[in-house]
Image: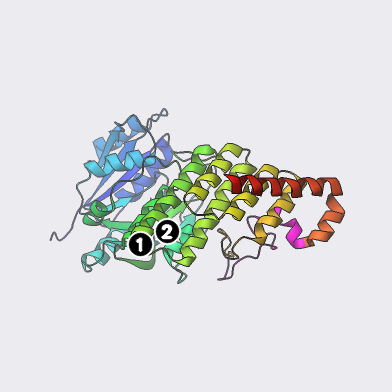
Amino acid sequence: MSLFPLVSIIIPTKNRRVLLQETLDSLVAQSYRNWEAIVVDDGSKDGTFEGLVELANREPRIKPFRRKSRMSGAPVCRNEGLGIARGAYVIFMDSDDLLAPHCLQQRVSFLEGRCDLGYAVFQAELFDRVPGDRGEPLNRENGQDPLERILNLDAPWQTMCALWRRGSLETLGRWDEQLAAGQDMDYFSRALVLGLAYRWVPAADCFYRTAEDCRETIGNQTLNATVFESHMRRVARTRRMLRARDALGQRQRELILGNVLCWATLAAEEGFYAEAFSIWKRSRRRGFLDLRQFVAGELFFRLCRTRLGRVAFWLLMRIWPENAFVGTREAEGEGMLELTDRRHPLARHALVAREGLGRYLWRHLRPRQLAGVSGLFEEKVRRARMS
């Protein structure tokens, strides 16, 4: 075993010449010297790659590459970078985040003495412009199962927080290049389901940039049909892996069901009705939804932008498992938000639950409208039973 094993830091980048300079400066400032930065450019148009070449001429540990694949995106660049990397340890890093000067020394020292671990996860800190200007932790250990946190849209870790042993990555496999969003949640979910041994270390050693005008992403950052599809692909994979290992428990089932409702609802709210119905129908075929849930959900998506949509949502909630929601953990503490709490992600549709059905109908709907939604629900149930 080498006294100072090589650490490969793999960084995808696109059109980030200035921010990437800061990221690479944080590597040059490391007290641990045996590292290589594999920087894969995803088709920059602002001189990022040319600037990289200049930096590499002065610092040979920085190694610039252009993406070779016809496909683009951070996962493609990470896979290509991993194929080039020579390190015994690997860190995946975004091109606008920073490492503290002691980061690599701390991480290597921790894993070198624990050969039973496949990776270790370290604390990150939020910053806007300069490390320390916010001083808030990005990820906290709260005692909850990390896979359940991911399924609850409460990501416990960020990409750069992990130091991976090279052998564990061979077990884990490549990044999913089809995902337009949620790639890091997918990667960590696979590691957790596969049971790769790890340890959480609460010592902060990296910094996640939060300034909105700086955090442009390589992939999609606006909600669109591809993003919704990516999240459902990620969740479906987690479910398949859990089932294959006979580890799909009741809580995981509820959270996966909550993801179906979350992403289908967001798609419908954004006007992507075809994608909302596609998510819902595929989830029915896969056995996520029973017949009543399927019919009530379809009715809700058709009406979600109308006053009748709140009645349809109330009908859906009458048959929805109480714990099958995601994104409902309170910012502080361990409590979960109630559906009637205005901070709940679905609160905008829960006016009937807050006011009561009778009061809502009296204030907002006419009898003819109510008869229309009732008849539509009964007709959809009848057709579903016949199909």
* Residue 2, quarter of the rendered image: bottom left
Q: Would you say residue 291 sits in the magenta stretch?
A: no
Image height of 271 relative to 251, above or below:
above
Q: Quadrant of the N terminus?
A: bottom left
Q: Position of residue 261 (x, y in %)?
A: 57, 52
Q: Residues within 10 Å of mark 1 (few under 14, many from 20)?
A: many
* Residue 120, quarter of the rendered image: bottom left
First to last magenta residue range: 332-354
Front in this rendered view, residue 268 or 113: 268
- Left or right relative to 167: residue 206: right
Question: Which residue lies at the image location 57% right of the left edge and 65% below the top edge?
Answer: 323
Image height of 26 relative to 136, above or below:
above
Q: Position of residue 29 (x, y in %)?
A: 31, 52
* Residue 40, quarter of the rendered image: top left
Residue 157: mark in rendering: 2
- Disc 1 is placed on an element classified as strand
Q: Amino acid at mark 1?
A: Val
Residue 147: mark in rendering: none
Front in this rendered view, residue 251 or 181: 251
Residue 121: mark in rendering: 1
Question: Which residue lies at the image location 40% right of the left edge and 51% below the top edge?
Answer: 237
Could one spot residue 350 in this view of the protein? yes
Q: Would you say residue 339 sits in the magenta stretch?
A: yes
Image height of 210 relative to 64, above or below:
below
Q: Amino acid at mark 2?
A: Trp
How much space separates mark 1 and mark 2, taking CA atoms?
Answer: 7 Å
Judged by its main secondary structure, the magenta piece is loop
Question: Which residue lies at the image location 87% right of the left edge and 55% below the top edge?
Answer: 362
Marks 1 & 2, CB-CB < 8 Å contact: yes
Q: Position of residue 41 (x, y in %)?
A: 34, 35
Q: Quadrant of the C terminus?
A: top right
